[in-house]
């Protein structure tokens, strides 16, 4: 399955989306639509999340907290940004927002998830990593 995301927030993007729909239909393609009303994450937030996951993985590894010491007890597994996102960020995200995908979060929900995750890791392991901010 090939996924494409559209943000329709003005008449130009609306017209381009309608053009895409019409062209796909005319070519005999089946297209399934799913929409979210309201603004979701920005590209900058997405990049910041991935940078945060990478930085947290490095901080946990540097502090000696591999996945065995943090989550799994059977095997030494160093943290990576993908593992941080899958085993730390997403479970909290799902509990707080009910959403599985970071693509469907509203802008303010990133801060909610980060605050809970950061507080937990700081309290339990003494590891705290700031969420990346835009350069001024």
Image (cartoon, helix red, strand yellow):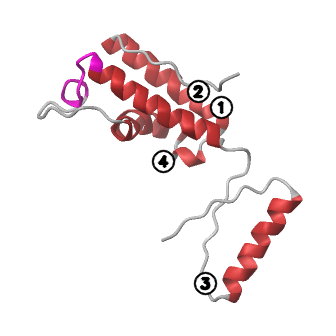
Residue 108: assigned label: 1
Look at the numbered discs 4 and 1 and tell me whether their residues touch, using CB distance below 8 Å: no
Please name the residue shown 58% across and 32% down the image.
110
Look at the numbered discs 4 and 3 and tell me whether their residues touch, using CB distance below 8 Å: no
Query: Which quadrant: the C terminus?
Result: top right
Earlier-in-chain disc, 4 versus 1: 4
Residue 111: assigned label: 2
Provide residue 48's location: percent of width, then percent of height: 55, 33
Provide residue 100's location: percent of width, then percent of height: 48, 47
Residue 17 shown in magenta: no
Mark 3 lies on residue: 29
Q: Which residues are magenta?
A: 62-70
Residue 65 shown in magenta: yes
Mark 4 lies on residue: 100
Q: CA distance from mark 2 to mark 4?
A: 16 Å
Q: Quadrant of residue 68?
A: top left
Earlier-in-chain disc, 1 versus 3: 3
Residue 41 seen in the current view: no
Provide residue 51's location: percent of width, then percent of height: 48, 32
Left or right: residue 96 versus residue 38 is left
Q: Quadrant of residue 87?
A: top left
Earlier-in-chain disc, 4 versus 3: 3
Circle 1 Cα neighbour tier, 10 Å, few/some/many (<14 / 14–19 / ≥20): few
Left or right: residue 21 versus residue 118 is right
Q: CA distance from mark 4 to mark 1?
A: 16 Å
Q: Secondary structure at mark 1?
A: helix
Q: Residue furthest right?
A: 11
């Amino acid at each position: 399955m090939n996924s494409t995301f559209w943000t329709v927030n003005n008449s130009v993007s609306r017209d381009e989306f309608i053009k895409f729909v019409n062209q796909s239909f005319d070519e005999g393609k089946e297209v399934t639509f799913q929409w979210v009303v309201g603004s979701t994450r920005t590209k900058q937030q997405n990049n910041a999340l991935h940078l945060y996951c990478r930085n947290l993985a490095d901080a946990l590894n540097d502090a000696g907290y591999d996945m065995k010491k943090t989550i799994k007890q059977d095997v030494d597994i160093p943290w990576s940004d993908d593992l941080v996102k899958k085993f730390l960020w997403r479970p909290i995200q799902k509990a707080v927002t009910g959403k599985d995908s970071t693509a469907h979060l509203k802008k303010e929900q990133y801060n909610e998830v980060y605050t809970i995750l950061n507080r937990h890791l700081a309290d339990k392991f003494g590891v705290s990593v700031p969420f990346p901010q835009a350069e001024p």
